[in-house]
Amino acid sequence: MLSKLAATGLWFVWAAAAAAAAIAGLRLWRAVRAAGNDRWKLVARQSSVTYGKVIATGENDAWAFGWDILGIAAWLPVVDGPHRITAFHWDGERWEKSDFPVGVGSLGSVAASAPSNVWASASDQDSSYLLRWDGSAWTIVHKPHGAGGILAVTADDDVWIFGRYKAWHYDGATWTEQSLSFCPFRVSARSASDIWALDGITRCVHHFDGGVWTRDDVTRVLPKAPPPSDEVPPGPLVPRLTAVNADPSGIWITGEIGMSSFLLYRTGSGWRSEHTSATAGRMVRGVPPVPDGRGRHWFLGSTDLNGSDSALAHRDLYGHWTRVPAGGELTSLSAVPGGPLLATGRIGKASGVFVMTAPTASETP
């Protein structure tokens, strides 16, 4: 694998990631006895976050969320819950459990603009909640009726929560409700005047310029069928957009058609798409592309048809891909600014939060 990485120029990407893991996060990995494998090391042994989510909010700050199953009913088929939400915080030294005001319920999304401005949506049988971490404690700051739990946060005075054909905006003092012409499904913001949203009903992308929302129909560039080499399930094949990330390099959207994944992106004035089954495998639904800080991106792909044997895929500026098996199942992905990648999932008998280390030279993408 070493020669392949060097040939594509991606060895330097992996080397940089390894150096970052060794330097920027050294204190993080000392806390847990070595577990995982030679690519991913366990840093927080917390089984409740195995199928949860991790978000890095600063160079020395990150959160992992999950849930504990309560009662026998939660183990029965087609029964969802009850669950108790769990939250764990890394302060640059260690991971510790944090008190979360909503106990039994479900977590929506999490977004942040700084370590002291972290927002989360949650719900229980009675209400929907919007919570904020101010650097010292979680508090419930709003109960938006009908909110779907989709968040976008760019600053202390610019917070959005989206629901079905509705949005609520916080300007630092008051909340304003507004109607939308579409149903937001996934959202990513570059600034207060540059927000991108996927439509949960149609195959359209919507953009907010600080004043109005406009629709961009991307149907013309979406794949009409999976690659010929892929297995095709029975029934109609309709492309679906599943996750979005907006960053300085462009707009990056993952999607799937049948059992195949694709990438939709816009780095200039137009949209383009490409199949990723051969390059990244089937991507984990709902996990957005993660920028590496150099205009390139990480993706949570796989090596099997079902997408449960995870692989870390990297796409460079020229559209070249490298894929390295994770050796387990990863469920979310986030990058520490100037540092390594974090993921939730299970590798071997270890489950919780993992940090990426350099791949071995014997691995073949």
Image (cartoon, rainbow, N blue to C red):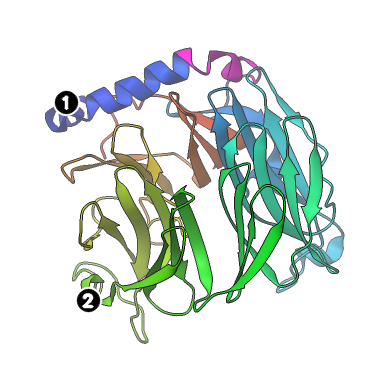
Q: Is residue 107 visible?
A: yes
Left or right: 365, with 81 as reference point: left
**Total number of numbered discs in the rendering:** 2
What residue did someone put label 1 on? 6
Specify few, some or many for label 1: CA neighbours under 10 Å numbering under 14, 14-19, or 20 or more: few
- Residue type for callout 2: Arg
x and y percentages locating residue 228 in the rendered image: 18, 71
Q: Residue at x 31, y 26 (%)?
A: 14
Decide if residue 9 is on the left or right side of residue 353: left
Front residue of this view, candidates 361 and 282: 282
Give the labeled residue for mark 2.
220
Identify which residue is drawn at 73% across, 57% down: 122
Q: Residue at x 31, y 20 (%)?
A: 15
**Up-down: is 29 above or below 51?**
above
Please tell me whether residue 25 belongs to the stretch shown in magenta: yes
SS at circle 2 = helix
N-terminal-most mark, 2 or 1: 1
Q: Up-down: is 159 above or below 125?
A: above
Of 25 and 231, which appears nearest the observer?
A: 25
**Camera-nearest label, 2 or 1:** 2
Task: Provide residue 258's location: percent of width, then percent of height.
Answer: 35, 74
Residue 159 image offset from top left, x and y in percent: 61, 51
Quadrant containing the C terminus is: top left
Q: Which mark is residue 53?
A: none
The answer to which of 66 and 180 lies nearer the viewer is 180
List x then y, in percent, for residue 32. Answer: 65, 21
The extreme bottom residue here reads 235
Mark 2 vs mark 1, CA separation in Å: 36 Å
Q: Are marks 2 and 1 in contact (CB under 8 Å)?
A: no
The quadrant holding residue 222 is bottom left
The magenta stretch spans which residues? 23-33
Residue type of the residue flagged with mark 1: Ala
